[in-house]
Amino acid sequence: MTATKNTQVFGTDAAGIKGAAAVLRAGGLVAFPTETVYGLGADACDGRAVAGVYAAKGRPTFNPLIAHVADLNQALALAEFDDRARALATAFWPGPLTMVLPRKPGSGLSDLVTAGLDTVALRVPSHPVAQALLVAFGGPVAAPSANPSGRVSPTRADHVLAGLSGHIDGVVDGGACAVGVESTIIGLSDTPTLLRPGGVPVEAIEACLGAPLSRDTTPQKVQAPGQLASHYAPQAMVRLNRDTRDPAALWLGFGPACAGAERNLSPAGDLHEAAANLFTYLRDMDELAAQGQIIDIAPIPAHGLGLAINDRLARAAAPRR
Ligand code: TXA
Ligand code: MG
């Protein structure tokens, strides 16, 4: 697709937020920071605007998007909350949790947001810029990650511009995202189910619910980009669980044992720091890689945020479509 739009960069001051909200109101596309990754926002009640999100990302099919709202009150207008949903909202909103809930009829949400499903994915982000934009706009904002479909998610405004400049109307530059991996998605329309590991550790959600979650992050069930095998992919080939250096490859380390790695997600072995660095370092490694050179990645512990990190890395290493 040819780049035809003049992509404005907005600041995070009152004028910037006002400008970005005006773009949303006019049916335009504006990327904005959340605590997880940058989202590509559109008015969730405007089908034409939402269709523009799919076009700009080159999403191959209409997969459901997350509707972002400023607070629980706005969320209550869009979906049915049972006791479990209320408990999770109280514990983790605002924050990196998305809940898939039964959709309320007549809420005005475009069917393109939910891809025609009778459920809707809702999230209240905690990032002050996302909050300010949602309050200024005053309604639900549909926002997938602000990257071309299948590529690494953006955690800085320049990542957004590298992928989508000329295809979107603007981006609010709020600096780097603190969490660095997308929200945890929990399905609550039936048995509580983990649909995507993310910024809230699964252990914390299970502790809040007082019961283990069903696991269903298989690609067959929901054919959405975040659940397809090859996703979050750098250009170079990726090999996982490499605890020693291969001189022919580049090495993305984790922890103190990875001396000499080109990048280290967290030299101290801290999973929060590793999540925050993940997508930026995958981009860096891709830039450093010579033609045909492989990116090796050190083992990452499979607890807490490590679950989300390993999920994204497994997809980055999966055979390409
Ligand atoms: O952290 C995040 O969640 C970021 C920021 C921007 O909020 N957003 C994000 O959106 O990651 P996206 O579109 O890349 O991923 C949304 C995922 C899709 O993979 C889809 O599977 C799931 O949400 N989803 C949305 N609605 C759903 C529904 N009704 N049922 C099941 N899954 C749904
Ligand atoms: Mg995404």
Image: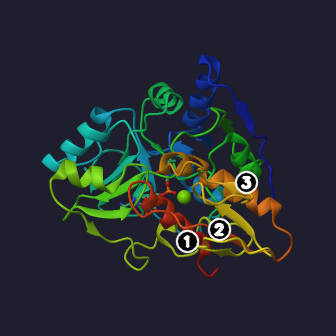
Q: Would you name the residue on which mark 2 appears?
A: 233
Q: Residues within 10 Å of mark 1 (few under 14, many from 20)?
A: many
Q: Is residue 81 visible?
A: yes
Q: Earlier in the sequence, mark 2 or mark 3?
A: 3
Residue ID at (37%, 49%): 200
Residue ID at (74%, 46%): 161
Residue 180 x/y as whole percent: 55, 47
Direction from residue 109 to residue 80 in the image, left or right: left
Q: Is residue 28 visible?
A: no
Q: Would you name the residue on which mark 3 appears?
A: 163
Q: CA distance from mark 3 to mark 1?
A: 19 Å
Direction from residue 121 to residue 33 in the image, left or right: right
- Quadrant assignment for ligand 1: bottom left
Quarter holding residue 9: top right
Q: CA distance from mark 2 to mark 1?
A: 7 Å
Three-letter code, disc 2: Ala
Residue ID at (50%, 48%): 270
